[in-house]
Image (cartoon, rainbow, N blue to C red):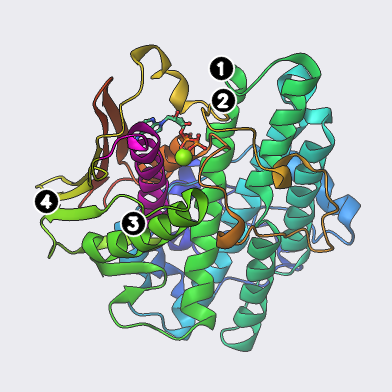
Amino acid sequence: LRPRNRTLAAVAAGDPPLLPAAAASSISPAPPSLTDTRYIPLSAQPLFHRQPRDREEALELIPRYARRSATPVSLRQLVDFGRKPTAERLLLAAQLMHRELSIRLAHRVVELQSLPYGLSDMRSVQRVRELYENSFADLIMYPRPERKGEEERRFTELLRRIRDRHADVVRQMARGVLELKQACGLGADNLHISSFLDRFYTSRIGIRVLISQQVSMSLERARQGYVGIINTRCRPAHVAGDAIDAARALAYRYFGDEPPAVRILGNVDLEFPFIEGHLYHMLFELLKNSLRATYECHRDSPDALPPVKLIIADGQEDVTLKIADEGGGIPRSSLPEIWTYMFTTAPAPPESLIQDDVIPPGGATPASRDTDPIAGLGYGLPLSRLYARYFGGELSITSMEGYGTDAYIHLAKLGNKLEALV
Ligand code: ADP
Ligand code: MG
């Protein structure tokens, strides 16, 4: 490996400058295209170790990987890097993923092993840890792809399988925390637990972004205006339209009445680069909350339900979206609690969460939109805030008790903020 192949991040992480010849025999030299890393701070340099032969040997490497720091990337870097997805660039990206994802997965395994209050011993948490261990092992037992084309695509398919089998992790963790609460009264309002969950879910968002970006660029057909999963011309008014339709349909099924109208105001033509899925997630959660609050606050009144307003603003630094409802607001004493996982004023959590149902091979039981409850997990706000903060944004709530609630989503417009990996 030539020194110019090493990025600043690799130097900072203290990578060995050169691979000894003996070690290099199991790892082919990196291709010259590695200079492309000028776009992205990730390193493709393999960590110095022998190719593990089995799961057990692979798991022994976890502490080594966990000693490395994850390298956060920005939206802008992902766009610049992915703009010309040549076969060489995709191979390089796969090699970057091979190292970076192994490091990120290793961190999670180590943390899942050492949670306080016996949370690590909860069955559902152990299952999540096994999932992370398996993915780590699968990843580092898979030789780093060295040839563009087929070899890179087969590796990317492995990434896709890993992503898909982690689909149910949020629910599994939620179940673990619920078990803990039932067992000893400690809930997600506990500071240790909520900051662990913040770290855990943020990391999960990051891992899924990196994998989805690679899968999209390598295995899926390119879409006009997109770089992988990033829409360079993401239009908040369009995403809001979809989220409004879905949230209103859900509200209708749940309450059996015509739900409040939602009006989109402000800069409806605005476009900026963003991951639509993330924006959709936040808007859908906030709209569900506003529709439910409006309905519950006004259902006994003969007047029409007051509409929810969704206002889009374009600034120099931020794109801001405000969701304003007249649903009666939130008592000031509850405001700190709404950011903790599992705080809800909705009836008991849905059966599907509590039931310890058998998870099919592969691990995934993605809850379908149809069976999603409108509320009840208490996860809507804290998770949405992680999505907002992920690329340097923020989500905040202001309430006027007795009148209504304003929720603000601030998103960094320039895309130059690094992933907020905590
Ligand atoms: P969930 O909707 O599953 O209860 P959330 O995290 O989305 O979980 O919200 C937590 C709680 O915060 C809700 O149960 C509700 O009591 C309160 N809340 C959130 N948004 C609003 C709103 N717009 N108006 C009134 N109360 C709200
Ligand atoms: Mg909610």
Label at residue 314: 4
Q: Is disc 2 surrounded by few (<14), some (14 to 19) or many (20+) residues within 10 Å? A: some
Mark 2–mark 3 distance (CA, rounded to whole Å): 26 Å
Residue 28, quarter of the rendered image: bottom right
Task: Look at label 1 and name its amino acid.
Answer: Leu
Secondary structure category for the residue under label 4:
strand
| Contact check, label 2 and label 1, Cβ < 8 Å | yes
Q: Secondary structure at mark 1?
A: helix
Earlier along the polypeptide chain: callout 2 or callout 4?
2
Distance Cα–Cα, label 2 vs label 4: 32 Å
Where ligand 1 lies, by image quadrant? top left
CB under 8 Å between discs 1 and 4: no
- Residue 295 location, x and y as percent? 37, 40
The reply to whether dot 3 and dot 4 touch (C-beta < 8 Å) is no
Give the alpha-carbon distance from disc 1 to disc 3, as whole Å: 30 Å
Query: Which numbered marker is on residue 194?
Result: 2
The residue under label 1 is 191
Disc 4 under 8 Å from ligand 1? The reply is no
Front residue (pair 272, 45): 272
Q: Is residue 355 above or below residue 372?
A: above
Q: Which residues are magenta?
A: 278-302
Image location of residue 406, percent across then percent down:
25, 34
**Three-letter code for the amino acid on which mark 2 is drawn:** Ser
**Which image quadrant for residue 401?**
top left
Looking at the image, tell me whether mark 3 or mark 4 is earlier in sequence order. 3
Q: Residues within 10 Å of mark 1 (few under 14, many from 20)?
A: few
On whether residue 284 falls in the magenta region, the answer is yes
Q: Quick one: label 3, few (<14), some, or many (20+) residues within 10 Å?
A: many
Q: CA distance from mark 3 to mark 4?
A: 18 Å
- What element does badge 3 sit on? helix
* In front: label 3 or label 4: 4
